[in-house]
Image (cartoon, rainbow, N blue to C red):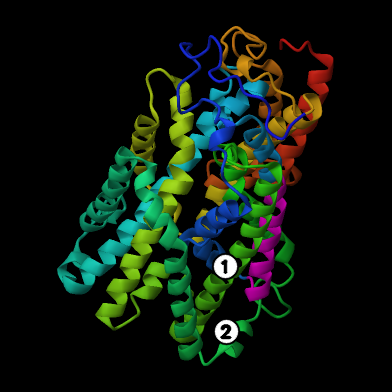
Amino acid sequence: MTEHEPIIDPLAGVQDGRLYNDDLAPVPASRRTWGAGSYAALWISMSACIPTYMLASSLIGGGMNWWEAVLTIFLGNLIVLVPMILNAHAGTRYGIPFPVYCRAAFGTTGANLPALLRALVACGWFGIQSWIGGNAIYRILALFVPAVAKGGVIAALGISLPQFLCFLFFWAINMVVVIKGIDSIRLLLNIKAPLLIALGLLLLAWAYRHAGGFGPILSQPSAFDPGQPRQGRFLAFFVPALTGMIGFWATLSLNIPDFSRYARSQRAQVLGQALGLPLTMALYSFIGVAVTSATMIIFGRTIWDPVEVLTQFKNPVVLVIAMLALCIATLATNIAANVVSPANDFSHLSPRRISFRTGGLITGLLGIAMMPWKLLADPSGYIFTWLVGYSALLGPIGGILIADYFVCRRCRLNLTALYQEGGEYRFTGGFSIVAIVAFAAGVLPSLPGFLIQLGALPASAVPPALAHVYDYAWFAGFGIAFCLYVTLRKIAPSRR
């Protein structure tokens, strides 16, 4: 077996079928040009972003000290790197995107289930990044036109009209890029990581100067230490926080075939991802941790939003340059991380009717509907409702895909059949009953805890042991779905 599975080019008899379009077609070997450096650069670019900063600083806001927060993030990314590399294997070997990869386990129609769930999460992230960029524009306007900041809050939205309009303005810039095509963002991606790293270092220097050096910053005690407000409750916070850290990139750990399909070899994608992901996340998160810790010393309160921290700068030139850099970097991250996958996923719903660009526009509209400013309203909601909540859905999908591809199929797929409506991956009317049962079994144990977290169910209504499954949502869902899928696939006919 060669590194790249031989591809029939063109795929005989499937180009006119319902399951095929050019965006979902296998990438031929001649276009697989990404080396290890490309994947390392991709992850450095995507990891050096404002949500990474907020991820780290939210742990500080929850009570951790600096090294507890950085270690939690590093461990989470080290764990999620494993399914990331495993799921990337099929993309590299067969040149297929994530929705097509899902057809082998979930069926040619059933693949829409994991694809849509992944797409909806991406819509939320698209909205979050658009809100961050729009909020930066709003802060710049408020600096020069103070009346902008005096607008009343719209009850239905929870934000003011100027805030909403700035959000829509930045959102519209993203949509223009989607319409023009991903190639238009290439230059921004190349300069994006240096911009945010430079901005982060400037914030770090500011924190060092105004907090009296790193000593006071790094000596901030953990709220879980003896004599502190949350003494003895470290594990109760650490476990769901670790799950949230895994959830942060659980999205990309599924749709990584969308990128690995361009790899020169398995070695390139493995080495590039291993070098680019965990260390970059840990290093950039340290900036967030240090600056957030400094805000407690400087202002007497924890400020976990970097945009709010930047508004503390009195020099308008510095503030404008910093905010513009943040906007450009956020735009580049948003297109790369939050448009490529959902555009392919929505295209998979109807390949003959929905193109990549149309899928990108759908992503944008849903990103508005999700009201991302509410997802970022407080650190607790960001980690324990948003990140942990969707990890409960994505963990089982990851378990099923890895079980199917590595255990049941031994990395062998019938490439042509993946694009055939009546082929071996049709299962039962296009759906794999085995995969759907395994997915439901993986998600259900975390549901009571999620409803408690939302406030939709009183904690007293659920046994404590069952409620705490939610703290391990990704682990529990992945493990249950993996084991059940392998078991059912052994005892059930392959057509199921």
Residue at image coords 49%, 59%: 51
SS majority, magenta? helix
Q: Amino acid at mark 2?
A: Ile
User: Which region shows up in magenta?
Assistant: 64-82
Label 1 residue SS? helix
Label 2 packing within 10 angstroms: few (<14), some (14-19), many (20+): many
User: Is 243 located above or below residue 140 in the figure?
Assistant: above
Q: Residue at x 54, y 61 (%)?
A: 55
* Left or right of 126 in this view: 287: right
Say if residue 451 shows up in the picture: no
Residue 78 located within the stretch drawn in magenta: yes
Q: Residue 356 sits in which quadrant?
A: top left
- The secondary element bearing badge 2 is classed as helix
Residue 494 lies, in percent from the top left, at 75, 12
Structural crowding at the residue carrying mark 1, measured as other residues with C-alpha within 10 Å and reported as few (<14), some (14–19) or many (≥20): many
User: Which residue position holds label 1?
Assistant: 285
In the image, what residue type sits under mark 1?
Ser
Labels 2, 1: front one: 1
Q: Does the residue at mark 2 contact the one at mark 1 (Cβ under 8 Å)?
A: no
Identify which residue, 481 or 9, lies in the foreground: 9
Q: Quadrant of residue 407?
A: top right
* Left or right: residue 120 compared with residue 151: right
Q: Give the percent coordinates (x, y) of residue 60.
A: 58, 70
> In the image, what residue occupies the spot 49% across and 74% down?
302
For residue 160, the mark is none
